[in-house]
Amino acid sequence: MTDLGYCDGSSQPNGSITTYTGKSINLFSPHPDEVCMADIVAALPHRNRYNGQTIWPYSVCTHSCTIFDYVYQVDPAPTLNKLAWALMHDATEAYLPDIPRPYKHAIPIFGEHEDRLMAVIAEKYHMTPECPDIVKYADKHIGRREAYELFPTPPAWVEDYDDIGTDVPRWDVDESRRQFHKRLQAVFGPDVLTK
């Protein structure tokens, strides 16, 4: 694995996990200083969407790049905030698991923790507290195209979504990380991994 650099470490209190860079993040009470872009970039290429029940591994990282590309192409004047949210809308999954939607709704406390962590990430990277509508739309409706390309037989729920006409790239872990990092640099600057 490519060395992604390290952020300043901290001690590991109860309720914390250790990250790629050796930092600790308290999942019950996260703080912006515990969030590190190098940890996000290290983790998301290894997190697969759809609980891994796909024809090929399709990472959260690749999905985020797809949302970024959609926003960049469709929005006539995409702001840095919209592009940041496109890349980071699932950044919590660097620290928390991606729980399938039906089960996630049965565990409301998980959603509360996920929302709290996302608010900390948004604060850390100077993003608005609320995800922009275009990112929400793309994140929801990309499911149709992903389902047609990732499942042997597309599930019936695809008919509930718009076809937003976005390609679903087939990247391995390293390519997904490289593409994600390239887009992060465009939004957050060349030293993004130190943030």
Image: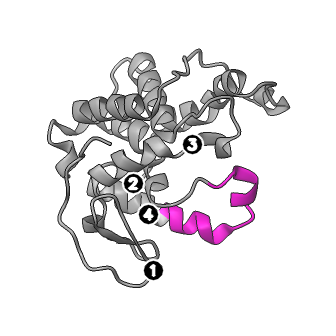
Q: Which colour scheme is used?
A: one colour
Q: Distance between the residues labelled 3 and 4?
A: 20 Å
Q: Is residue 153 above or below residue 54?
A: above
Q: Which of marks 2 and 4 is in front?
A: 4
The answer to whether residue 134 is above or below residue 72 is: below
- As measured in the structure, the alpha-carbon distance from the residue carrying label 2 to the one carrying label 4 is 11 Å
What's the residue type where badge 3 is placed? Answer: Asn
Asked whether residue 64 appears in the rendered view, the answer is: yes
User: Residue 166: x and y, percent?
Assistant: 55, 18
Secondary structure under the numbered disc 2 in the rendered image = loop
Label 2 environment density (alpha carbons within 10 Å; few <14, some 14–19, many ≥20) = few
Can residue 89 be seen from the camera position used here?
Answer: no
Q: Indicate which disc, 1 or 3, sits on the residue closer to the N terminus.
A: 1
Q: State which tag comes first along the sequence, 3 or 2.
A: 3
Instruction: Determine which residue is flagged by label 3.
Output: 48
Considering only order in the chain, which callout, 4 or 2, is on the residue closer to the N terminus?
4
Which of 1/75 is in front?
Answer: 1
- Mark 3, mark 2: which one is toward the viewer? 3
Which three-letter amino acid code belongs to the residue tagged 1?
A: Gly
Marks 3 and 4 in Cβ contact (< 8 Å): no
Distance Cα–Cα, label 3 vs label 2: 26 Å
Residue labelled with disc 4: 117
